[in-house]
């Protein structure tokens, strides 16, 4: 009985240390990735406003790319917009990525025409 | 759609009341991605879509309220149930006494650190402290201090790194599990160490006695 308890305790200790070590490594990898990459990948939970904020591009560029009205700002996440437009999330992410590439230097976009929604 | 998308959609649609509700429900013990929610709220503040003070006040009150509900449910419902089950299966009484000793030993420190540093433990400690009838006023003060620190820390981090919500949430979420793992490793390692050191002389005594 004593030996059994001893082994169980040892096993629990080894498992906890192993899981903690793996978690620590993953955390360090994430932190390193975060440090070296300015942009974070676009995910389904993100709103268009957040993506524009995260990628430092004017929001209207992304709204226009998805054929969304500029006002009021659409606060739905990408996954919901994709469903509403009957497209896959990956397809919408592709459209947004393309718009971001063209909005960034050396391709700054022209300013939006005042008062006009696409 | 996963839980994170649902929570985000709820907060986008429901605004401050939903943020308050989500924080309170999570503090009661429902597993919701609160690191992500608070950091996301910080980012929304930086984008000018939410107000800093409203977010800080509502999420702090929500978290403290949720803690008190968890504590209250355990104290006025869980305790009776735990002792009833203990009598029925003849195993709970000793465990409850042990839990009582642990909550008395760690007291407010345990509540305080589980609010913001080792957050996965928070709801469990609410239940333990409720069942063991830890003084409510002391629990309220420590949980209040810890929750306010948690909210301010995560929301301000989100505001500061407002363009990297995903990366920051994942890093902070992992970090709190690493801290919990280190703590658990320390406790288990210490238990194993004392167990092995106590076992040796006892074993010798036993063999001398029989010989």
Image (cartoon, rainbow, N blue to C red):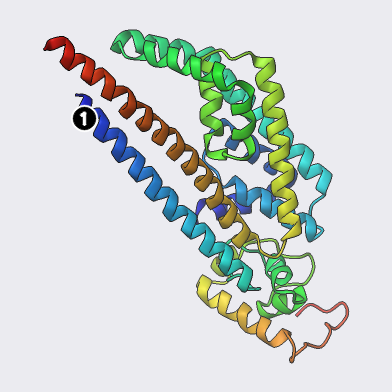
Work out which residue is located at the far right of the displayed protein and give it: A114
Q: Is residue A71 visible?
A: yes
Name the residue located 66 percent from the left edge and 83 percent from the top edge.
A99
The residue closer to the viewer here, A2 or B137, is A2
Q: Tell me residue B7's x, y (percent).
A: 59, 49
Q: Which residue is mark 1?
A: A4
Residue drawn at point x = 67 percent, y = 69 percent? A51
Outermost residue toward the bottom in this view: A106
Q: Is residue A87 visible?
A: no
- Toward the viewer: A8 or B117? A8
Q: Chain of mark 1?
A: A
**Where is residue B92 drawn, in percent x and y?**
36, 14
Q: Residues within 10 Å of mark 1 (few under 14, many from 20)?
A: few
Classify B144 as above or below B79. Answer: below
Q: Which element is circle 1 on?
A: helix
In the current view of this chain or complex, which residue is farthest to the left?
Answer: B211
Q: Quadrant of residue B22?
A: top right
Residue B143: name its quadrant: top right
Residue at screen point 67% across, 34% down: B63
**Left or right of B42, for residue A43:** left
Is B136 rendered above or below residue B122?
A: above
Residue A24 x, y percent position in the rendering: 49, 54
Residue closest to the eye, A22 or A78: A22
Which quarter of the picture shows residue B104? top right
The residue positioned 76% from the left and 58% from the top of the image is B160
Q: Is residue B80 left or right of residue B147?
A: left
| Quarter of the figure with the C terminus of chain B | top left
Question: Percent position (x, y) of residue A12?
Answer: 33, 38
Is residue B176 toward the left or the right of residue B57 in the image? left
């Amino acid at each position: 009985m004593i030996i059994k308890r001893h082994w169980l305790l040892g096993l629990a200790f080894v498992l906890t240390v192993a899981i903690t070590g793996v978690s620590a490594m993953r955390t360090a990898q994430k932190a390193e990735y975060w440090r070296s990459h300015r942009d974070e990948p676009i995910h389904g939970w993100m709103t268009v406003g957040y993506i524009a904020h995260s990628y430092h591009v004017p929001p209207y560029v992304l709204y226009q790319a998805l054929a969304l009205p500029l006002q009021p700002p659409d606060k739905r996440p990408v996954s919901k917009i994709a469903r509403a437009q009957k497209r896959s999330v990956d397809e919408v992410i592709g459209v947004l990525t393309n718009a971001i590439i063209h909005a960034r230097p050396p391709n700054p976009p022209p300013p939006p025409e005042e008062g006009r929604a696409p | 759609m996963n839980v994170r998308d649902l929570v985000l959609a709820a907060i986008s649609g429901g605004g401050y009341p939903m943020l308050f509700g989500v924080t309170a429900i999570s503090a009661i013990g429902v597993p919701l991605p609160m690191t992500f929610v608070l950091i996301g709220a910080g980012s929304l503040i930086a984008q000018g879509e939410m107000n800093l003070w409203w977010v800080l006040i509502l999420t702090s009150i929500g978290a403290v309220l949720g803690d008190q509900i968890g504590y209250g449910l355990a104290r006025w419902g869980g305790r009776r149930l735990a002792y009833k089950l203990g009598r029925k299966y003849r195993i709970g009484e000793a465990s409850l006494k042990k839990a009582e000793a642990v909550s008395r030993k760690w007291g407010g420190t345990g509540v305080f650190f589980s609010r913001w540093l080792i957050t996965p433990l928070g709801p469990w400690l609410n239940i333990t402290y409720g069942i063991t009838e830890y003084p409510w006023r002391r629990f309220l003060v420590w949980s209040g201090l810890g929750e306010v620190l948690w909210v301010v820390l995560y929301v301000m981090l989100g505001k500061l790194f407002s363009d990297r919500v995903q990366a920051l949430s994942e890093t902070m979420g992992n970090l709190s599990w690493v801290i919990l793992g280190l703590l658990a490793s320390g406790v288990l390692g210490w238990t194993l160490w004392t167990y092995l050191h106590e076992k040796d002389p006892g074993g010798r005594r036993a063999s001398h006695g029989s010989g």
